[in-house]
Image (cartoon, rainbow, N blue to C red):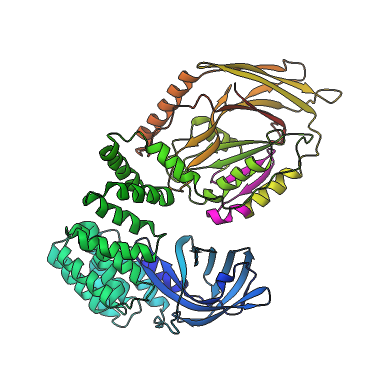
Amino acid sequence: MMHKRHLVLMVILSLLLAGAKIFAQADVLEGRWLFQSVDEKGSKNPLFIAEILKKDSNFELVIAASSAPFQVSVEVFKVEGSSFELVMSGSDQSQRLVFSGKAEAGLLTGKAKVSGMERDFIAEKTQLKSLKKQEPLGREDLEGFRKASQLKDPQEKIKALRFFLEMNPGSGYREAAHIEIFNTLLIINADPESVREAAETAVARASDPARVMNSIAYNLVSKGLLLDLAEDYSRKAVEKTSSGSPTRVLYLDTLGWVLFHRGQLDEAGQYLEEALRRAPQQWEIAFHLARVREATGQLETARDLYLKTYVNSGKLEARQRLEEVLGKLEGSPARLHALVDEEFAKKPAPFQAGKSRITAPQRTVLAELFTGSECLPCQASDLAFDGLLKHFNSEAVAVLEYHVHVPAPDPLANSDSLARAKYYEIGAAPAAVFGGRERRAGGGPSHMAGNIFGEYRALIEKQFNRPPGIKLVVEATRDGDQVAGHARIEFTNAAAPLRPLRLRVALLEETVHYTGANGIHFHHHVVRKMLGGAQGFVIGPTGSLEFPIQQNLLELESELQHYLEGYQTEQKKNFRELIYTLDRNRLLVAAFVQDEQTKEVLNSVLVRLN
């Protein structure tokens, strides 16, 4: 659905890039590109046409045409390799737009952010030379439209939007107002004739009827309503676009999806195959084609499409249908996890971490990441921490990852991980802490992982040569379900320090296989419990310097299950899965000594349980 925020973002996204310089490495950047915003249904809205020319070792981007009705300026443009970040502002400096993207597979793709909102964008090679200009949008129009469209009561909203249209017949927001009326009628399950009338009015008033017909058809089929109208609109949308149009692939997908719901499976498959051939990375199209193939008994093809869709998009429904198809093919979905793991393992790393030459520094630096499997900006930080594990050995860096419920329930979180976040006064994820004192907040999409890894590595390396004053020795073993051992502290200075110190011990699972909304599947060094509690053991200058390590794993699994089930009940939010069983062959123990006044971690150690 095209909400008002999508329209505002679409306009702001139409900023110009005149004169920007690109220092990218891929010759694929040369040529004429059509930049488009992409909404949550996959609909594309043309923004501008850019000509990218190669000059010596650099690239220059010049705007050839734009749909924007106003002037903009480029404030910042940073490029590393094929990735870029672009900050732009409008003529009144009231809005700033940030593009973060990269060149791959013959496309330019990424995210655009403005005023806290985020939208996908895509740029495709084009032969187009001009775009239809959007009408200038006045502030009074914007306020009137916004006030009407933000009303909570659906009936009052419809009434206010119609009054807005009556009073502002020439408003640049009239198209969005008609679409908002249609969408609101769908939401409240209005009678079909009222919905049909609103749809016809929205199409009649549209500046681009094909785009509006496609959007309406997709929303109708999502509600299972007026499928005859949905088919008529989706066919007309396809007919109105040329074979080379960048929007044709989305219209083909909508038509195929409508025909699937109308039971016309052969024709649906033809349109969806063509759409997927044109856009092989559009996983919503792959899912639609999988539904058709499953319905026609082509189960192996459906299985492969569901698997790729789930692994590349995290679409939960694709996983659920994959389970069903495996049951039909093999009698049971037992191989589901193995297939998912295998497919995820095929995905290339977003960057090469290399191997550090530092193998035995004076101290082992503790690297702690607060993350969440439902947290989209945590992608880059998670992958950067994977890079730390590859780059440094465990004598140089001890890596711990704490999961928190951001922004949705995370089954890898526990009460100790939340207590640890509170200890550092961390209110948002991702956030990384190195040696207890050096912090780096914020993350980003996966293509930013290499940059963030470089920042993390620099923060770690500057701590290697600081004498810790403390030596840690940890001995721990697992016998069946019982973990036992001890941690011993030795002060390497002449006298034990008088400042308050605590020893903390964490039980980690080396790899947990789980896919949340951010698409990260392999979660490494996940803290499952702080042995002795999140507060740790007090270290006194004259007290005991040897501390016990003990944990029954069956009791821990029961504790984790109780926590997750209690969280669901208390918050009235369900997890995608309840993950509380432990892989007993992949457990680690991390211990570290921390100054309670400064939070500096003096030294740490990481050992694998036998």
The quarter of the picture where the N terminus appears is bottom left
- Is residue 552 in sight in this rendering? yes
Horizontal arrangement in the rendering, residue 113 relative to residue 288 (left or right): right
Queried whether the magenta region covers residue 523, the answer comes back as no
Residue 400 lies, in percent from the top left, at 60, 35
Which range is magenta?
Answer: 427-450
- Is residue 163 in sight in this rendering? no
The quarter of the picture where the C terminus appears is top right
Picture quarter containing residue 529?
top right
The vertical placement of 133 against 147, above or below, is: below
The vertical placement of 410 against 119, above or below, is: above
Report the residue at 43% width, 82% height from top: 128
Q: Could you say which is closer to the camera, residue 245 or residue 396?
A: 245
Q: Could you say which is closer to the camera, residue 240 or residue 279?
A: 279
Residue 148 lies, in percent from the top left, at 31, 68
Residue 161 lies, in percent from the top left, at 27, 70
Queried whether the magenta region covers residue 447, the answer comes back as yes
Report the residue at 23% width, 68% height from top: 159
